[in-house]
Image: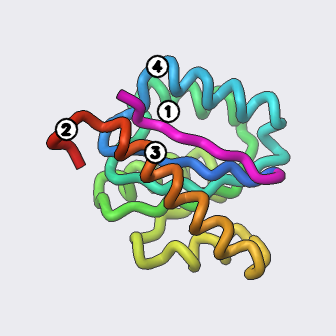
């Protein structure tokens, strides 16, 4: 089952998590993609149904950051995810959490031009739908 879907538009990573943590393979591929693009040249908007990196995956992410700050907006209904974002902010001061109703606020936080909002919303919905199609029957 897939738990992570990604699309890159210019330097913006659109990332969707399902309800579970990404697999080790998904996480390794994600980090490799970020590294190939150049971490200091990226920004990310992440939507999640509750899935988040494991503690080991977060350590590898912090190792990749190596003290650099990357603008990241995380949109989730999960209080646990928002707590994780707070912990990650100790290593990346440019990460911020938003509730599901705050997607446009999250996009504004990343200083993305307003003429891109509709495209970003559409692409994030596609990523989420892709993950839901991959979920086993009976799972959201």
Quadrant in the picture for residue 136: top left
Relative horizontal placement of residue 133, taking residue 28 as reference (left or right): left
Residue toward you, 7 or 98: 7
Give SS at disc 1. helix
Q: Which residue is mark 1?
A: 58
Of the two numbered discs 4 and 1 in the rendering, the one whose residue sits closer to the viewer:
4
Q: Is residue 93 above or below residue 122?
A: above
Relative horizontal placement of residue 28, taking residue 130 as reference (left or right): right
Of labels 4 and 1, earlier in sequence is 4
Of labels 1 and 2, earlier in sequence is 1
Give SS at disc 3. helix
* Quarter in which the N terminus is drawn: top left
Residue 96's spot in the image, x, y percent?
54, 63
Marks 4 and 2 sit apart, C-alpha to C-alpha, by 23 Å
Quadrant in the picture for residue 54: top left
Marks 2 and 3 sit apart, C-alpha to C-alpha, by 14 Å
Residue 79 image label: none
Residue 15's spot in the image, x, y percent?
56, 48
Residue 109's spot in the image, x, y percent?
65, 73
Of the two numbered discs 4 and 2 in the rendering, the one whose residue sits closer to the viewer:
2
Residue 137 image label: 2
């Amino acid at each position: 089952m897939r738990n992570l879907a990604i699309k890159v538009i210019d330097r913006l990573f659109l990332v969707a998590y399902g309800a579970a943590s990404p697999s080790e393979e998904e996480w390794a591929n994600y980090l490799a993609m970020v590294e190939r693009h150049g971490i200091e040249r990226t920004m990310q908007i992440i939507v999640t149904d509750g899935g988040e990196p494991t503690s080991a995956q977060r350590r590898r992410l912090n190792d990749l950051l190596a003290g650099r700050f990357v603008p990241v907006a995380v949109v989730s209904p999960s209080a646990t995810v928002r707590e994780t974002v707070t912990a990650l902010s100790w290593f990346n001061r440019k990460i911020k959490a938003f509730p599901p109703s705050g997607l446009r606020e999250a996009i504004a936080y990343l200083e993305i031009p307003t003429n891109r909002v509709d495209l970003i919303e559409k692409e994030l919905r596609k990523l989420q739908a892709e993950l839901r199609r991959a979920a086993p029957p009976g799972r959201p």
